[in-house]
Structures are given as C-alpha cells and as structure tokens.
C-alpha cells in the first residue's frame, strides 16, 4: 500500500491531539482495547497521515481479534514516514503475523523478511517468519531458521551444550556422514 500524500495537519501535533493519543494508548496498555478502539478510529480519521496513530489503531484491532480490520492500519503505519524504530519493528511484526493468521502466507513471508532486513537481530521476527515459511511449504528453511534462533538464544544448559552443532546442522539439514544407511 503506497503512502498517499497528506496535508501537514494529517499528523498529530499539539497538546490536545497528543493527549488523546496518549489516552487511547493508555487504555490499550491497561487491557481495555475495546475502549481505546473508538478513540483510535476517530484519531485515524482525523490524522490519516500519522503512522503512530495507524500503528496504535492496528494494534487495538489486533488484540480484539479483529485482524482483518487491523491490516489496513498496519499497512498505513508501515508505508508512512515517522514511525519510531521500535514501533516500526512492532508494526512489521504485527502486519506479518496478522497476514499469516489470515492465511495470506506470501504477504506474511514478504513482510517478515522486510522486518528481518531492517531488524536483523530480532528473534521474534525470525520466529514468526519460520511459522509463515512453514505455512508456505518451506519446511527446510523454516526448520533451519528455528534451529539458528534456538542455538543463538536458548539459555537451556542442554541446548547451550550443543549450540555449535545446532548452528552447523541448521546450515545443511540433509548432511550426513558416510553412505546412507550405514
């Protein structure tokens, strides 16, 4: 979704608008997304060029189980400039995960790969990409990605003992030593 040209007033500015956004985010964070949703929808209509508003609106829909309704807001948040780094990471993860749960697997893989391209050390993006790869039939790549993630992040002592082996085998899951069957 390409970002449309928007007027400068389409972005939240001023104390009053910022306080409305803060109130809506506070409600979502307090576990009351059903109260945050109408406030965010009003802000999204008033400020269509604000990536932060779009992201928060998407998130509220997502936690309410309204994934299909969340997608256009996630797409807008990712397409528009001005989304701070951690929020951009969250928007890419949310959009990719939402695409996956809606059965839009190719879109999920594309979005999550973009996320990993921008945030290469983010394990959550990798885990969600592995699920989307599984859904597209890319089982080999999915398993390899999960093994690399496990090897890199696990604090389990029994996994840590085999970290190098797991990372090595993730590079070639089909490798064997000697003739087959021996």
Image (tube, rainbow, N blue to C red):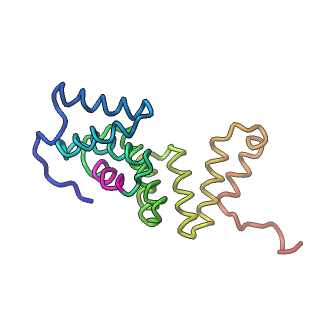
What x and y, as percent, mark residue 26? 36, 29
Query: What type of secondary structure mainly makes up the magenta span?
Result: helix
The N terminus - image quarter: bottom left
The residue drawn where x is 45% and y is 56% is 113
The residue drawn where x is 67% and y is 46% is 151
Res. 163 image quadrant: top right
**Is 22 above or below relative to 137?**
above
**Is 11 above or below relative to 130?**
above
**Is 179 above or below relative to 155?**
below
Label tally: 0
Please check the rendered image and state whether residue 21 is part of the magenta-colored stretch, yes or no.
Answer: no
Res. 35 image quadrant: top left
**In the image: residue 112, left or right of residue 131:** left
What x and y, as percent, mark residue 131? 56, 58
Between 85 and 94, the one lying in front of the other is 94
Q: Report the span colored magenta.
A: 69-77
């Amino acid at each position: 979704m390409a970002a449309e040209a928007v007027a400068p007033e389409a972005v939240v500015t001023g104390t009053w608008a910022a306080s409305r956004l803060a109130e809506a985010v506070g409600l979502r964070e307090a576990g009351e997304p059903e109260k945050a949703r109408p406030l965010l929808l009003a802000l999204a209509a008033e400020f269509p060029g604000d990536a932060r508003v779009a992201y928060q609106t998407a998130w509220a829909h997502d936690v309410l189980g309204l994934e299909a309704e969340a997608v256009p807001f996630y797409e807008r948040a990712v397409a528009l400039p001005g989304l701070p780094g951690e929020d951009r990471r969250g928007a890419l993860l949310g959009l990719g995960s939402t695409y996956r749960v809606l059965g839009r697997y190719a879109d999920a893989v594309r979005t999550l790969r973009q996320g990993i391209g921008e945030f290469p050390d983010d394990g959550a993006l990798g885990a969600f990409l592995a699920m989307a790869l599984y859904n597209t039939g890319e089982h080999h790549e999915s398993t390899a990605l999960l093994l690399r993630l496990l090897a890199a992040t696990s604090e389990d002592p029994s996994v840590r003992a085999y970290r190098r082996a797991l990372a090595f085998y993730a590079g070639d899951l089909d490798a064997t030593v000697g003739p087959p069957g021996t």
